[in-house]
Image (spheres, rainbow, N blue to C red):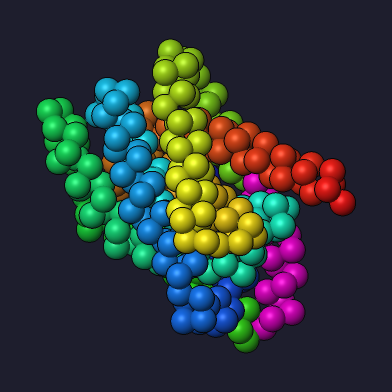
Amino acid sequence: MNPILLVLPILTLLMFDLGLTLRMGDFTLLARRPRAVVVGLVGQLVVLPAIAIALATLWDLSPIYYVGLVLIACCPGGSSSNVFSKLANGDVALSVTLTAFSSIITLVTMPLVIALALKLGGGSARMVELPVGNLLMQNLVLMFLPIVIGAALRHWRPSTAAAIDKVLSRLAFPLLMLLAGIFFVQHYRTIGAHIVDLGACVTALIVLAALVASLMSRLSNFDNRVRRTLVIEVAMQNAAQAIAVASSPFIFNDAVMAVPAIIYALMMNIVLLTYVGVIRHRAQSNA
């Protein structure tokens, strides 16, 4: 089976589920608490891509993996970040707001950042073609439209939306792991040949993103709940979208480019589950 036949529907389902959780209040949070929202978005949309480009350059990644790593950083927050924020006793309202805003804003910023990264990459990286029109169209159809439909259902049929979300929210993590597993099986030789070096680079991206988000929070004098949320939101990106963009026949059509996202999907959960576990352990020790 061609994995793209699973990637695109799963991404659509995840975005639809995100829409089911949205309320107008999630967007008005920008007016009520602008500093936290802006710092979070800067961390996701500016700082994270900058870290990815720096690491890809430092590791001297091949053009395909270079773009694959930057692609992860261009994606919006992952749908599981809201659950992780709740487990970490974070600011769930802020988490939902950042996920919603980043999902919409990255429709525009993703092609811009990738284009910039290709120029900065130099050499053979500049030979990677970016079909901007196809990228925008796929993101609109597979991300923006499902979010709008889900939000509309939440507004007009809240009980139905809640029932559907109860099912889909439980499927989000298993579906992402299913995607990663399918790609891993198909490309295990390639992954095995680069797992040490590429795995270290991907893990560095996650850890540095979390550390920088924590530093930005402390400099902004945010409380612990906001700081935990920003750490999770900046470090946890939508790996399913990165896989979809890399492997889509309408965009890059290169499953190997999805390898960094596959490794990221695994390491993201390991690193952030450890982070959440430490927080919960400290809370129990201090109780």
Q: Quadrant of residue 224?
A: bottom right
Q: Quadrant of residue 158?
A: bottom right
Task: Tell me which residue sits at (65%, 40%) in the image.
Answer: 275
Task: Tell me which residue sits at (45%, 70%) in the image.
Answer: 35
In the image shown, does 174 or 25 lie closer to the viewer? Answer: 25
Q: Position of residue 200 (x, y in %)?
A: 46, 23
In the image shown, does 225 or 195 lie closer to the viewer? Answer: 225
Question: Which region is colored magenta?
Answer: 157-173
Q: Position of residue 73 (x, y in %)?
A: 39, 45
| Residue 45 in view | yes
**Residue 165 higher or lower than 135, as above or below:** below
Task: Tell me which residue sits at (23%, 54%) in the image.
Answer: 112
State the predominant SS element of the stretch in magenta. Answer: helix
Q: Position of residue 190 (x, y in %)?
A: 42, 18
**Residue 27 higher or lower than 15, as above or below:** below
In the image shown, does 284 or 235 lie closer to the viewer? Answer: 284
Q: Quadrant of residue 101?
A: bottom left
Instruction: In the displayed orientation, state which residue is furthest to the bottom.
Output: 156
Q: Position of residue 229 (x, y in %)?
A: 59, 57
Task: Tell me which residue sits at (49%, 42%) in the image.
Answer: 211
